[in-house]
Image: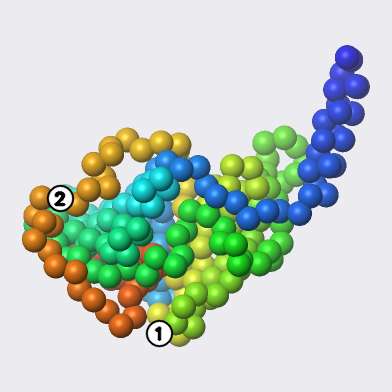
Amino acid sequence: MNFLGVLTCVSVLLAAASTQAPKHCVSPPLMSGQFTLMAGNGVYLSTGSISSDAFGKRMRVRNNVMVGNQSTGIDELMLFNEEAYYEINWKTISCKKKQLDSSFIPMHVPEDARLMGQVIMGSSSSWGMGVLVNTWYGTLPNNGSYSTVFSEIGCIPMTYSVHYPQTGWITLSTYNWVLGNVNPMDYHPPFFCQKAKLEVSDMPPNFFTVLHSLALQSKKVKH
């Protein structure tokens, strides 16, 4: 087959793909990446690393906090199957176990999410200049709403924008994702968490409000 024939076949395949409606998708089961969090209308800024295990429905989120020349911080281990998360403070070697609302797990597009649109981030003028993405939106418990952007190919999460009356906007951007997890022990609480008792709440936080709390706690540590 000559070059013109190959180009024609590729064009046909791309045209067929473009006519298909975006589908609700699930991200690869094991992923590690980084994030930037802005909350409270830009007042709080947090960056860190994130790892996900879809098999066990577990996530580990670490904040990068620098105090002087030393790194310290608080991180969160979220166990969606247990509807609980650990707030781990490495500065004080202490741990809290709290109730978690597991109705929204961020590594997939929920079945009740509605499609807002499909766009190319970047440019479609040439190969490699842009990424085809889908934007979805929906509602969360406690009068919350969200929109989220996933790549069409691979179902890689890129951004989440969440609004609650009590917190305002929470914006999470993720990047530098790689497939796989480096350390399986990320999903086990450290030894000093063994005696932590579950704190029950009438309105358990979800993934987003946990990150909001993490940003606030890290801000206190930093100052």
Q: Residue 192, relative to residue 206: is it above or below?
A: above
The image quadrant of residue 76 is: bottom left
Image location of residue 26, percent across then percent down: 55, 50
**10 Å crowding of disc 1: few (<14), some (14-19), many (20+):** few
Helix, strand, or loop for circle 2? loop
Can residue 19 be spotted in the picture? yes
* Residue type marked 1: Gln
- Residue 144: image x %, image y %? 49, 78
Q: Which quadrant of the figure contains the C terminus?
A: bottom left
Q: What residue sits right under mark 2 in the picture?
A: 190
**Residue drawn at (71%, 62%) of the image:** 117
State the residue in front, 220 or 79. 79
Q: Are marks 1 and 2 in contact (CB under 8 Å)?
A: no
Between disc 1 and disc 2, the foreground one is 2
Label 1: which secondary element: loop
Q: Quadrant of residue 219?
A: bottom left
Report the residue at 24% width, 69% height from top: 98
